[in-house]
Image (spheres, rainbow, N blue to C red):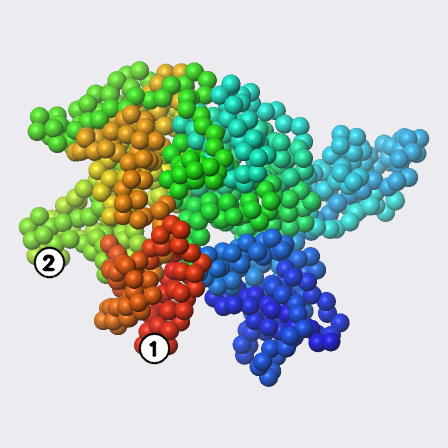
Amino acid sequence: MASYADILLPLAQPAYTFAVPEGMELREGQAVAVQFGARKFYTGIVWRVHDRRPDFEKIKSVHHLVQERPLLTSRQMRLWEWMADYYMTSLGEVMRVALPALMKPSADTEEELIREEFRPRTECYVTLNRDLDDEDRLHEVFERLSRRAPKQYDALLEIVTAREEGRMPDREIARRLLSADLPTLQALERKGLILREEHERSREQGRSVFLLPELSAHQLEALDRLRCSFEGGSHTALLYGVTGSGKTEIYIHLIAEVLSGGGDVLLLVPEIALTSQLIERMERIFGSRVTPYHSKLSNRQRMETYLRLNASSGGEFVVGARSAIFLPLNRLQLIIVDEEHDTGYKQADPAPRYQARDCAVMMARLFEGHTLLGSATPSLESWINARSGKYGYAALEERYGEGELPRVEISDTIRAAKRGERKLHFNKLLLDKIGGCLDRGEQVMLFQNRRGFSPYVECTDCGWTARCPHCNVTLTYHKNNSKLICHYCGYTTDMPPRCPACKVADLQPMGFGTEKITEQIAALFPEARVARLDRDMASSPRAFKQVLSDFALHKTDILVGTQMITKGFDFDGVSLVGILNADNLLHNPDFRSGERAFQMMQQVAGRAGRRKEGGEVLIQTSEPGHPVIRKVVENDYEGMALGELQERKAFSYPPYARLTYILLKHTDPTLLRRGAMDLASRLRQRFGRRIMGPMPPPVDRIRGEYLVGILLKVEHGASSVRAREVLREEVAKFRTDPDFKRITLQFDVDPQ
């Protein structure tokens, strides 16, 4: 009977059917080589094997099997299918982001593809000949070598010692762990004393007994609550803990329990570069069990990590950014999402625009494991799920050990300006506190959520501002290289010496970013050692690590930074945190702005006073009576949450509704507007008042393309599955117009 296979390719397409050659046996999840189109060859994944011949006349055959072992398990395949359906994208686009680049090569010829196909790295392993298990025989060999071949004697002694120390699993040891050179090992092999073999690199499992941190009474109570939640049938639980309360210690105990039983653990972090302290701590406890996975690894490193995990029998511990959810952990029992509220878990581009936290919750169900969400400022969606009983819940409401929560104070910028108590961008109260900290040898963090020297430059004579030619935004001035840069498309130009419009006045930097704050604070406190940490500094890994290292070693007194300084850092010398402009956090055109502002300020405030003495936090704002600011001062997360939820319920926003944002893009604004009106009209006929728009986003042109958005709200209780079906139907009808086919459509389900 003829056999056919649906093959998934790394293209924005569904799976395509190919004939399976006679004698070839395929299984779901295997990698195969196929020809797609006139000349192109791809590596694809076998999605389904069946005996139903497709309708088209000519069917291409699978060329060859790339690897016998399937790259995907059935659970991973179900996860991919769920993501493609939920985030309204194709399976091929999921494949494109899920697999490392070297595992999905393409080529113009089959021969070229074969050369590019991924292969696990092999290395040399050495095994002691079984004849030498006899102790008398071993002594005889050593005595002979000591007289005639001292280098061989040393090499054989090293191999025997490694075996006795337990460094030779299954009697073999990797040659990279030996100091002997290749000619010496070859000589031992010729004498029949050792065997050498090349095979896929294995990973030493590391120790299975871990030195765990001692828990306080509050931590033990929280740990017991989490265990009870999981044992009671909850797949997901929320661990709420104020900054510095010791959530990581609870993570460690749960991780150790799973690893000791041979299960796999995945620890997700918002951004791997910003959580170096967490990874180092995990490595001190779990040693070589820790496997980092993130975009900073080379393509080969990511491929080798994937293949090694795919062949593992369990006991793996991966610490990774959001893309780590795609790794083949065959015995996945626990997923921990640290700082689960962080926007870094949401993929912006390309499709699928997934939320890794929500995918982790789904994975817990598919893999029959558990997901633990941890945060000092949980997302309102997670918090309400915990309050309703959908998630398990445990809380840590005081800092670990003798640490105290910081004292938060407000400084009114308008009042300070009227009284003449404001210098540059700093109120006198903040400058006095910085001076006091420096006198006592303490450290300071200053938070300004905007990088660069100033957000824009302006001609004071004619009002001209520098704007990006490709995007509808002003260019940010970076003084260190005298450049104007677009933070959307990367366009860069030199700072003009005179206004290009009037040719008269000099351009003046307006507003302020981290670069400007760094320069000003260094001028105000010339004796202080000042450093900056933002996305510009993080572009160089060496400079980034150097900034953190210097601050940790007290070689820096004042650290100025963006939201990067809010994540995962624990510096014991910080006694003061200054938030320089809380207003720009509060007034974003986003229904989540209040929640995000609270989270940001609370997280950066948590960097202060991490040891015995509670630190201080000073918030500069022109709205000292703003309800979100007051809740930060009172450290009242629940009060903030209840206030925000009341507003969202009134206007039907998450978590009381599900949102889908449809973004239309084209270089012709007239065609785009016409297409957007047509699609919105179609959708309004099916969804009614649930459709909002079309409307341009705040930045309505990026990289030369104009943008228009349509928002779909599906209220709580209505079927989101049916809503996606209707949306697909109407988009398909919209696409029948030849003009509208040229318009790019992007779907963002649960936009952040």
Viewer-nearest residue: 239 or 492: 239
Number of numbered callouts drawn:
2
Mark 1 neighbour class, 10 Å CA radius: few under 14, some 14 to 19, many 20 or more: few
Image location (x, y in percent) of residue 47: 61, 64
For label 1, the residue is 737
For label 2, the residue is 501
Q: Along the horizontal axis of the image, is 116 left or right of 347?
A: right
SS at mark 2? loop
As displayed, is residue 746 above or below residue 548? Answer: below
| Disc number lying in front (1 or 2) | 1
Which of the 4 quarters of the picture holds residue 138?
top right
Identified at 29% across, 62% down, the residue is 688
Q: Which mark is residue 525?
A: none
Amino acid on which the number 1 mark rests in the picture? Asp
- Quadrant of the image for the N terminus? bottom right
Identified at 70% across, 60% down, the residue is 68
Q: Alpha-carbon distance for marks 1 and 2?
A: 43 Å
Amino acid on which the number 2 mark rests in the picture? Ala
Mark 2 neighbour class, 10 Å CA radius: few under 14, some 14 to 19, many 20 or more: few
Which of the 4 quarters of the picture holds residue 601?
top left
Image location (x, y in percent) of residue 487: 30, 51
Residue at the far front: name it. 717
As displayed, is residue 37 above or below residue 719? Answer: below
Image location (x, y in percent) of residue 455: 22, 46
Image location (x, y in percent) of residue 687: 33, 62
As displayed, is residue 717 above or below residue 444? Answer: below
Q: Is residue 535 visible?
A: yes
Identified at 38% across, 19% down, the residue is 404
Q: Is residue 545 visible?
A: no
